[in-house]
Image (cartoon, helix red, strand yellow):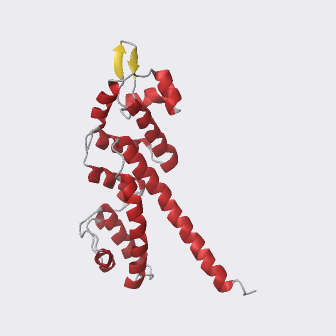
């Protein structure tokens, strides 16, 4: 995977832009840009002389990513910083996408007591869909939720899990195709994080509409 630092070097060979132009292009105030530079969220520009630096298209892309993660996905700066450090450090794409999923969906909030927890329902889902039988944050979160449902007296049987997993498998196949396309690391994170957040909300809204529609059909004649 191409690292951001390599992209910055390549971009630096072309005409650069000063802070004012970078601010206008990205729609971010100069003060915020300077803050991101100090905090390490934005790589330093190419030094022109002691008091001036030039910035590249990668800086524009990085600023757009930071803004999207903050204002669309709603991530705090600490979590954004963690993701960007992984990206700048050249983390493998699969590892980076797993971190994006863990952060955006708050899978990291699953208690450590659920790490590598196995449940019959979770194992059944993997078997139904022929998904890789390997530990992951997503699988831990599913197993923790199935355990919670069981404890509350609303267990998910295999018929329900088969139907649900079949539906989301089709959705995931469409979504993942978009995240494998961008070569630019900022665009990769943007596509994965924003897409995961918005598509997840879309699925919930569609499910709500489906429930409402079925209820209307069933009960509309009752008065």
Expressed as whole percent of the image width and height from the top left, the position of residue 110 reads 36, 62
Instruction: Write the residue at 25% across / 68% down.
Output: 132
Residue 117 occupies quadrant: bottom left
Q: Is residue 212 above or below residue 113?
A: below
Q: Is residue 172 above or below residue 192?
A: below
Residue 88 occupies quadrant: top left
Which is more toward the observer, 37 or 132?
Answer: 132
Which is more toward the observer, 79 or 21?
Answer: 21
Judge left or right: residue 200 versus residue 222: left
Expressed as whole percent of the image width and height from the top left, the position of residue 139 reads 32, 67
**Can residue 194 be seen from the camera position used here?**
yes
Expressed as whole percent of the image width and height from the top left, the position of residue 71 reads 52, 44
Assign the C terminus to one quadrant of the image.
bottom right
Q: Residue furthest right?
A: 223
Judge left or right: residue 97 versus residue 198: left
**Can residue 29 be seen from the camera position used here?**
no
Instruction: Write the residue at 46% across / 22% down.
Output: 19
Q: Residue furthest top?
A: 50
Judge left or right: residue 75 versus residue 142: right
Instruction: Write the residue at 35% across / 57% down.
Output: 108
Assign the N terminus to one quadrant of the image.
top left
Q: Is residue 156 above or below residue 6?
A: below
């Amino acid at each position: 995977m191409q690292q951001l630092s390599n992209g910055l070097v390549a971009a630096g060979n072309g005409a650069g832009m000063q802070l004012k132009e970078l601010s206008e292009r990205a729609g971010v105030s100069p003060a915020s840009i300077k803050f991101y530079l100090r905090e390490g969220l934005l790589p330093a520009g190419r030094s022109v002389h002691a008091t001036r630096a030039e910035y590249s298209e990668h800086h524009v892309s990085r600023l757009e990513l930071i803004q999207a993660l903050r204002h669309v996905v709603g991530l705090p700066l600490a979590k954004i910083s963690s993701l960007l450090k992984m990206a700048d450090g050249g983390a493998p794409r699969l590892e980076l996408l797993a971190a994006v999923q863990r952060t955006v969906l708050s899978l990291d909030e699953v208690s450590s007591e659920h790490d590598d927890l196995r449940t019959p329902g979770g194992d059944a889902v993997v078997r139904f869909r022929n998904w890789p039988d390997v530990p992951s944050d997503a699988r831990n979160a599913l197993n923790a939720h199935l355990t919670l449902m069981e404890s509350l007296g609303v267990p998910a049987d295999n018929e329900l899990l088969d139907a649900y997993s079949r539906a989301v498998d089709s959705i995931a196949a469409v979504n993942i195709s978009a995240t494998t396309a961008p070569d630019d690391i900022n665009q990769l994170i943007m596509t994965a994080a924003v897409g995961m957040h918005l598509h997840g909300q879309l699925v919930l809204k569609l499910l709500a509409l489906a429930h409402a529609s079925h209820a209307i059909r069933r009960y509309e004649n009752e008065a």
